[in-house]
Image: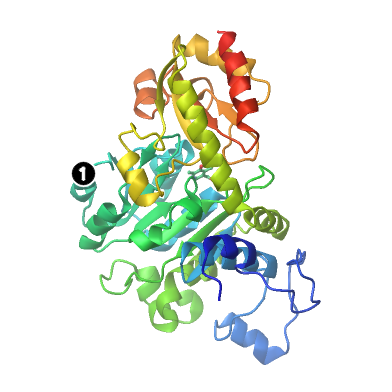
């Protein structure tokens, strides 16, 4: 049985296709699956046997993707979703009741700040955002109504690493799970479950898929959290009326959470991944180890070069030994900093705009984790609706530029930013 991550990235979750012996997992482009007979159909609908019913619920191509991510993250099982945001939505939907709270880091992907801070309110779920650099502040924000703590292993936009172990301890002391968004680190740099995370979510749109060609997400269940102990999670530990009173924790043990995400959340809310996109992500993941090595090496080189550039005010990258997050990067990321970071350009807003409009190799767009080098000026794009103070709080002040460093040759990457900085 393979154990090394590089090998799991290639082989995890996938075997020659049992129906055809095709070496590569085929795209099972089907909406539905024929029942063996009436009894088989009944058993499937009662969750007495697991099998294919309908592609909103499961699909063999998606299943291979789920198996690969579960193997890489060291979880018991995974669930593919239509996007990273759908993964977060289904994970929270399984845990939250009206009036309940999520304690979340302030430094998060902007879309997650919107999802938790605004859209979840319509379901009467409430985000309490804290400075998770201080686990004591996480502890202080947890109340009777808290149902989950949510952080990113490396926080997007850049340079921030969270102390997963310390935050997991605080969450567990209060009887709630820690959910970690591991999009920016990927299991190649960090496996949050080894550090106490109970659930891991990904935007597979980014580094997992790695080629900027599809939107996808995934939830991984560590299988370790005792959902029945506190009585806080009735969706999992109380009789479920939509399955004739089945109690998920009793019927399914350590896969109760991920099975509820599928058999309740995905079934009823519907954000299923297209098997075509699962195929692209599966193919991309085979080279995850190689790509992450190159992303990290190129990002470190570029960060060091920018640090010494006269037009650059500061660089925030946890891979740099002088970063305040470098100790955490050594503990959780093997000393690496990932492929994404931010820097400040002297001359503020006008200089930032000039830089992103002068690049030639870099693409000016809103995404990360592509093979291509990408650049964005958050205060004129993703964060432009925020007031100035809020922009600064979110790490998106007027001078901030974010790069997602691709896997091209580092000399070409540096040359492009050099010529673009000349234009300022
Ligand atoms: C992009 C992103 C998401 C959202 O994922 P989508 O696939 O775009 O829905 C969540 N978290 C992080 C860290 C991201 O970068």
Which of the two residues, 38 or 329, is positioned nearer the viewer here? Answer: 329
Using the image, determine if residue 22 lies above or below residue 385.
below
**Which quadrant is home to the N terminus?**
bottom right
Q: How crowded is mark 1: few (under 14 residues within 10 Å), some or many (20 or more)?
A: some
Q: Is residue 278 left or right of residue 19?
A: left
Q: Which residue is drawn at 69% across and 44% down?
A: 213
**Figure disc tally:** 1
Using the image, determine if residue 133 lies above or below residue 21.
above
Q: Residue at x 64, y 79 (%)?
A: 51
Which color scheme is applied?
A: rainbow
Q: Which image quadrant is residue 346 in?
A: top left
Q: Is residue 130 left or right of residue 342?
A: left
Residue 333 locus on image (x, y percent): 41, 49
Residue 324 locus on image (x, y percent): 30, 34
Residue 111 locus on image (x, y percent): 48, 39
- Whether residue 128 is visible here, answered yes or no, is no
What secondary structure is marked by label 1?
helix
**Which quadrant is home to the C terminus?**
top right
Residue 297 locus on image (x, y percent): 52, 39
Q: Residue at x 29, y 66 (%)?
A: 232
Q: In this view, does 55 lie to the left or right of 270?
A: right
Which of the two residues, 384 or 270, is positioned nearer the viewer here? Answer: 384
Using the image, determine if residue 21 lies above or below residue 198.
below
Disc 1 target residue = 137
Which of the two residues, 332 or 29, is positioned nearer the viewer here? Answer: 332
């Amino acid at each position: 049985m393979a154990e090394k991550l590089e090998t799991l990235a290639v082989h995890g979750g996938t075997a020659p296709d049992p129906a055809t012996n095709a070496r590569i997992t085929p795209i099972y482009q089907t909406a539905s699956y024929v029942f063996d007979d009436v009894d088989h159909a009944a058993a499937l609908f009662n969750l007495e046997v697991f099998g294919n019913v309908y592609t909103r619920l499961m699909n063999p191509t998606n299943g291979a993707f789920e198996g690969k991510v579960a193997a890489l993250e060291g979880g018991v099982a995974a669930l593919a979703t239509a996007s990273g945001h759908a993964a977060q939505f289904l994970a929270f939907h399984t845990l939250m009741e009206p009036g309940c709270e999520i304690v979340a880091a302030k430094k998060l992907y902007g879309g997650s700040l919107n999802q938790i801070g605004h859209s979840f309110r319509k379901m009467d779920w409430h985000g309490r955002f804290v400075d998770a650099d201080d686990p004591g502040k996480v502890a202080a924000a947890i109340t009777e109504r808290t149902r989950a703590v949510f952080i990113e292993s490396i926080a997007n936009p850049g340079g921030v690493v969270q102390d997963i172990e310390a935050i997991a301890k605080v969450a567990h002391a209060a009887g709630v799970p820690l959910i970690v968004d591991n999009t920016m680190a990927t299991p190649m740099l960090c496996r949050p479950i080894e550090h106490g995370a109970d659930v891991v979510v990904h935007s597979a749109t980014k580094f997992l898929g790695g080629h900027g060609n599809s939107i996808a997400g995934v939830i991984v269940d560590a299988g370790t959290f005792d959902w029945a102990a506190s009585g806080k999670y009735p969706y999992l530990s109380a009789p479920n009326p939509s399955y004739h009173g089945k109690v998920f924790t009793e019927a399914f043990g350590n896969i109760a959470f991920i099975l509820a995400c599928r058999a309740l959340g995905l079934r009823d809310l519907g954000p299923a991944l297209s098997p075509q996109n699962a195929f692209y992500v599966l193919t991309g993941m085979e080279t995850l180890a190689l790509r992450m090595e190159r992303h990290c090496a190129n990002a470190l080189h570029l960060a060091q070069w920018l640090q010494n550039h006269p037009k650059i005010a500061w660089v925030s990258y946890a891979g740099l030994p002088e970063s305040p997050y470098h100790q955490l990067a050594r503990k959780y990321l093997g000393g690496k900093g990932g492929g994404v970071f931010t820097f400040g350009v002297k001359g503020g807003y006008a200089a930032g705009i000039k830089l992103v409009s002068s690049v030639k190799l870099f693409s000016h767009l809103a995404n990360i984790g592509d093979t291509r080098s990408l650049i964005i000026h958050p205060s004129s794009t993703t964060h432009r609706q925020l007031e100035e103070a809020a922009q600064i709080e979110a790490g998106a002040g007027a001078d901030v530029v974010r790069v997602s460093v691709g896997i091209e040759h580092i000399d070409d990457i540096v040359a492009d930013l050099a010529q673009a900085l000349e234009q300022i």
